[in-house]
Amino acid sequence: MSASTLLFVAAVAVSAGFALVAAARDDRPGFAFFKPLTTFIILVGAAWLVQPGGQPYRSFIVLALALSLSGDLILVLPTERFAAALAAFLLAHLVYVAAFSLGSPIAARQLPWFAPWLLACGAVVAYAWRGLGRFRAPVLGYAAAISAMGWRAAMRGRAPALGRDGFGLALLGAGLFVASDMVLTVRRFRRPFRGAHELELAAYWAGQLLIALSIAG
């Protein structure tokens, strides 16, 4: 791992640490600063610091991170607009689907591998169903999108021309991103639990960071 990549990872860890402390202390100004800053650092690293990497794949990852950053910014506004943030993250997942499908196009024989992701996300939505209210339809669509994102990351390993290291990082990152969204769904719509917000954030940034690092693979 190059010095620039190590510096990148360290910067993400420090910023995420400050954000997690702010979240735990309910320090809203601090959280509003460090939450989008952490995602911004990951975006900058993916765009310029992580080397080498195929340009189309990098471009898709950077776009997905930019959409994620816009979602983070919406969520820390004084008047939160959850539906708008959900739309931004939905678009980010769709861009990740496109990124993970490069070199590994969707094929009928891959469809059975979609089922485990759908079942896992569907189980969480079913658990939170009573609390979803007007967000039922958007959350269903979002669950389908994140399931597709995880599935395409898993199928990326079936493309022999792609590096195995990059495949592993992308798959683990996608899995953590999906886990983060699962925790968010439970925390927001069904049963908040102690440390849920911090767990959600840690999985979110770890997932995004691993996906960014997959560029070098």
Image (cartoon, rainbow, N blue to C red):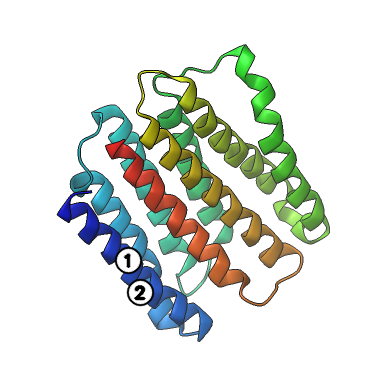
> Which residue in the structure is indicated by mark 1?
37
Q: Quadrant of the C terminus?
A: top left
For the point 41% across and 63% down, the residue is 73
Mark 1 is on which residue type? Leu
Q: Which residue, as the protein is rendered here, is positioned at the far left?
A: 3
**Left or right, residue 199 beside residue 210:** right
Q: Which residue, as the protein is rendered here, is positioned at the far right?
A: 130
Q: Position of residue 169 (x, y in %)?
A: 42, 42
Give the answer, above or below, for where 145 lies relative to 201. above
For the point 61% across and 19% down, the residue is 110
Q: Position of residue 99 (x, y in %)?
A: 40, 31
Quarter of the figure with residue 42: bottom left
Q: Position of residue 131 (x, y in %)?
A: 78, 61
Q: Secondary structure at mark 1?
A: helix
Mark 2 is on which residue type? Phe
**Which residue is at the front of the view, 148 or 33?**
148
The local crowd at label 2, few if under 14, some if 14 to 19, many if 20 or more residues have their Cα within 10 Å, is some
Are circles 2 and 1 on residues that touch, CB within 8 Å? yes
* Cα distance in 3D space between marks 2 and 1: 6 Å
> Which residue in the structure is indicated by mark 2?
33
Q: Secondary structure at mark 2?
A: helix
The local crowd at label 1, few if under 14, some if 14 to 19, many if 20 or more residues have their Cα within 10 Å, is some
Give the answer, above or below, for where 25 lies relative to 214. below
**Left or right, residue 105 beside residue 123:** left
**Which residue is at the front of the view, 186 or 72?**
186
Q: Position of residue 21 (x, y in %)?
A: 45, 80
**Left or right, residue 64 beside residue 55:** right
For the point 23% across and 57% down, the residue is 6
Q: Which residue, as the protein is rendered here, is positioned at the far top?
A: 108
Disc number for residue 23: none
For the point 58% across and 32% down, the residue is 151
